[in-house]
């Protein structure tokens, strides 16, 4: 029986942000059990690693974040 590595909270957030609609801060908090300030800090960390993560308006639903570009191989290792 193959064992799979458990999905980390970071993996979950990156998957949410990779969707076409992105993810709201509330969706990130619900998926990870993080407080909003922790979720925002994680988003800041992704930006520092080289991810392009613009904030987008979702009509009446509020603000969403979406990964539009990932870091290149050289930048990701730092």
Image (spheres, rainbow, N blue to C red):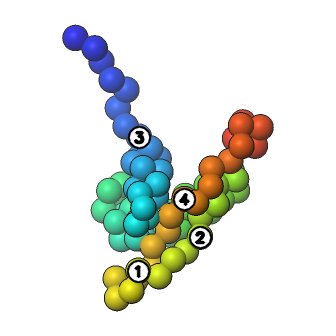
Residue drawn at 68 percent across, 47 percent down: 71
Q: Residue at x 59, y 70 (%)?
A: 54
Per the model, the C-alpha gap separating discs 2 and 3 is 23 Å
Q: Give the structural element (helix, strand or loop) at label 2.
A: loop
**Residue 13 appearing in the image:** no
Q: Is residue 32 above or below residue 5?
A: below
Residue at the disc numbered 2: 54
The tag on residue 71 is: none
At label 3, counting other C-alpha atoms closer than 10 Å, the crowd grade (few under 14, some 14-19, many 20 or more) is few
Residue to which mark 4 is pinned:
67
Residue projecting furthest to the top: 1
Quadrant of the image occupied by residue 43 = bottom right
Q: Residue at x 42, y 70 (%)?
A: 25
Q: Which percent across, then down, holds residue 34?
A: 39, 60
- Give the position of the N terminus as an image quadrant: top left
Q: Which residue is labeled 3 in the image?
A: 8
Label 2 or label 3, whichever comes before in sequence order? 3
The residue that mark 1 highlights is: 58
């Amino acid at each position: 029986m193959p064992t799979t590595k458990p999905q980390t909270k970071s993996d979950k957030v990156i998957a949410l942000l990779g969707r076409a609609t992105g993810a709201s801060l509330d969706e990130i908090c619900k998926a990870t059990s993080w407080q909003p300030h922790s979720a925002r800090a994680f988003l800041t960390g992704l930006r520092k690693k080289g991810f392009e993560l613009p904030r987008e308006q979702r009509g009446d639903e509020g603000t969403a974040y979406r990964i539009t570009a990932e870091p290149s191989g050289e930048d990701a290792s730092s």
